[in-house]
Image (cartoon, helix red, strand yellow):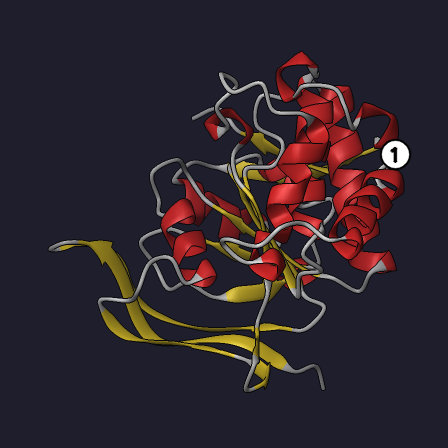
Amino acid sequence: MAETLIEFKDASLGYGPKEILKNLNFRIYQNDFIGIVGPNGAGKTTLLRAILGILKPQKGEVIYKHFSPDSPLRFGYVPQIQTIDEIFPLTVYEIVLMGRYSQIGLFGKPQKIDKDRVFSVLKYLGIETLANKTYKELSGGLRQRVLLARALVCDPDILVLDEPTNDLDLASEKTTMDLIKKLHIDKKLTVVMVSHLLNVVINYVEKIAFINSKEFKIHNIKDALTDENLSEVYGIKVRIGNLEGQKVVIALPK
């Protein structure tokens, strides 16, 4: 059986006196590929912040696996692409190197091992020729690949992605999701992603969780994808169909 990496036990999340999510009880296992979906404003990003340890629970606890006393769980985080400031003329190499700061230390200097790791990841993602390009020169799809590289360069145990296909065209959306799936399979990397783009998520993830006013639970994708489940989550009638091997969710007229 796969090891538990993170466990939420009766955890409630919120900000100040405001409670966003409550009574969360679930586990993230090694080599999971989980999609968390729900309407905008449902609390998806709040949950991601708690998974990353940035947001502490108001009640209950979040327990993290430690592989040894000096080896805590390591996260690779890919934020929403529009949150990255383009004002600073940083190169692709400089942005990806930021992902090594946990190993380098706050006042340390990059060593050969850090630089080699950056170029190894850039090569794996097919963007090594962009190392000296500035981030703001790149298309949306290439920017997302740079942010993936920054997340991977620390050799994470869990890759966490917040709306990884936001603001991407269809071709870049597919390329990005294919790449995330490849990372999960080739690197046996645990992946947790949130998205409001249900039709994208359901064709890639192996487990899915719905955020709404009901109980939060992680399901195997085959068990969860029913017309009834999705209609309840989104508050409208929907139908799940198939188009050339791809699952699609269609909102039905009232």
Foreground of the two, 92 or 252? 92
Q: Give the left or right position of residue 114, taking residue 214 as reference.
A: right
What residue is at 52 percent from the left and 34 percent from the top?
80
Q: In front here: 238 or 15?
A: 15
Element on which disc 1 rests? loop
Q: Is residue 126 above or below residue 129?
A: below
- Numbered circles on residues, count: 1
The C terminus lies in quadrant: top left
Outermost residue toward the top in this view:
137
Q: Residue at x 66, y 43 (%)?
A: 97
Which amino acid lies under the numbered mark 1 shown in the image of this protein?
Gly
Residue 5 placement (x, y as % from top left): 58, 76
Q: Quadrant of the N terminus?
A: bottom right
Residue under the image location 41 percent in, 63 percent down: 53
Residue 248 on image: x %, y %:
68, 35
Image x and y of residue 189, in percent:
74, 62
Furthest-left residue in view? 17
Residue at image mark 1? 126
**Vertical relation: 155 (above or below) 120:** below
Q: Is residue 71 above or below residue 43?
A: below
Disc 1 packing (10 Å; few <14; some 14–19; many ≥20): few
Which residue is rendered at x = 22% and y = 67% of the image? 58
Using the rendered view, name the quadrant where residue 95 is placed.
Answer: top right
Q: Is residue 81 found left or right of 55 in the rendered image?
A: right
- Is 9 left, or right, of 198 in this rendering? left
